Image: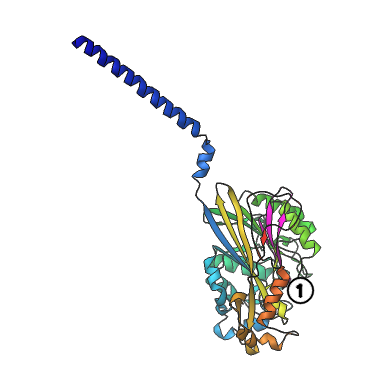
Amino acid sequence: MQTKHYRFKRRFFIILGIFIVCTIAFIALMVSCTDTKSDEEKKAEEIPVQKASLVAFGDDLFHDTVYQAYESDGYDFTPIYEHVQDEIDKADIACINQETMPVKSNYSGYPLFGTPIQIIDTLHDVGFDVVLQASNHSADRGSDAIETMLKYWKEKYPKVKVLGAHRTEEDANKIKVLKKNGMTFALLNYTYDLNGLSLPAGKEYMIDMLDQEHKEKIKEDIKKASKYDFTIVFPHWGIEYQYEPVDEQKEWAQFFADQGVDVVIGMHPHVIEPVRVVKGKNGNRMVCFYSLGNFVSCQNEVDTMLGGMAMVDFVKDKDGPRVTHYRMRGTVTHIGSGFSHFTTYKLADYTEELASQNYIRSLASSEFSLKVLKNLFKEITGGKSSGTLKLQKPEPGTEDGDEEEDDAA
């Protein structure tokens, strides 16, 4: 009896062991069948989502009346920017076009501008990360002024990216790159002209030019920039006081898109122009703000008081780096009575009461009011001041994309 019981027990454990082994094998097989993700897919899922936002403002156009308003304050220009300070603070990258050349003495307004060099201190102190210096006024005060301006930036605020101007040819051949939130941004700035002025022989590299003569260099710059996550171009282009981009702007925009640029933010016309999506030959979609108009100035027409604020959201995740959303919001230059002060408001924050106090009303040849400004913003943007870019690649060669109709100013 004991022997039979022993044999029975032994068979039971053998059968149980076989059952357990088969069960484990079956479970392993099922797991291997369901886990079809490649190592690359698994690695992609582990990539953290990185995000960054950019804000850019238009022309810092310092006529003599602008800087004279702050002479008694030692040329502390901070009040000009106080009503957009929250947007500068919120953005990971804040940019502005310093249209007029900072100089240490002999300040001047139109036509050969020379702005107190303290503007550099202000731009740094309010929080700008990127300052554009390639404009048609870059050579107004000669090459010495350009060198002095760049030296001042480098010695006092070396972390600020100053674009479009160079002290050496070696620097002119380097791409300015800003690192933010785990992403890299290649930044380029060019101007269409120097108002007929020229740089000294052998120093033509001091200002980056946007013309046919330099097209191959621009192409090479963008090629160098392509190894970074994003390429942003700030062109100084177009025709002054035109609400629509001219053919030359559109041709350059298509060229930039074809080279793989991600965002273009234009300056110079002194009035705003539309924002559009331009599709490159390889299917990429490039956001193009044709003109942000003036940020501050003492020009005397209503449309030159209306500026634009470009806002762009970037993301880098398992699908790679890309622009996800863009929008343009309005700004308004406010001039105090008798040119006593200058400041710039967001159009969304401006009121009819403020409009009634703006000194432009005594200078402009047409009506100035909040209603006029809002209607003008809507007219120029065509109600398309923001949009979202989808992941899929559309057919190349045409303009306009996924803009959302948005009346917000």
Residue 400 pos. (x, y %)? 72, 58
Q: Tell me which corner region of the image, top left, top right, bottom left or bottom right, holds residue 249.
A: bottom right
Compared to residue 33, the image places residue 158 above or below, namely below
Tell which residue pokes out farthest to the front in this image.
Answer: 1
Q: Secondary structure at mark 1?
A: loop
| Tag 1 residue | 241
Compared to residue 209, the image places residue 359 above or below, namely below
* Along the viewing direction, whichever of 109 and 233 lies nearer the viewer: 233
Quarter of the image where the N terminus is located: top left
Q: Residues within 10 Å of mark 1 (few under 14, many from 20)?
A: some
Lateral position of residue 242 relative to residue 320, left or right: right
Under mark 1, the amino acid is Tyr
- At 50% from the left edge and 40% from the top edge, which residue is drawn? 42
- At 58% from the left edge and 67% from the top edge, which residue is drawn? 153
* Along the viewing direction, whichever of 362 and 147 lies nearer the viewer: 362
- At 64% from the left edge and 52% from the top edge, which residue is drawn? 225
Tell which residue pokes out farthest to the left in this image.
Answer: 2
Residue 254 pos. (x, y %)? 75, 56
Task: Write the start and end of the magenta stretch as one range.
Answer: 261-288
Q: Does residue 390 appear in this view?
A: yes
Lateral position of residue 131 relative to residue 43, left or right: right
Residue 94 pos. (x, y %)? 58, 66
* Along the viewing direction, whichever of 210 and 144 lies nearer the viewer: 210
Compared to residue 31, the image places residue 382 above or below, namely below
Say how the picture is coloured.
rainbow
- At 51% from the left edge and 44% from the top edge, which residue is drawn? 45
Residue 305 pos. (x, y %)? 68, 78
* Residue 262 within the magenta-colored segment of the rendering: yes
Lateral position of residue 143 relative to residue 28, left or right: right
* Residue 213 within the magenta-colored segment of the rendering: no
Q: Does residue 60 appear in this view?
A: no
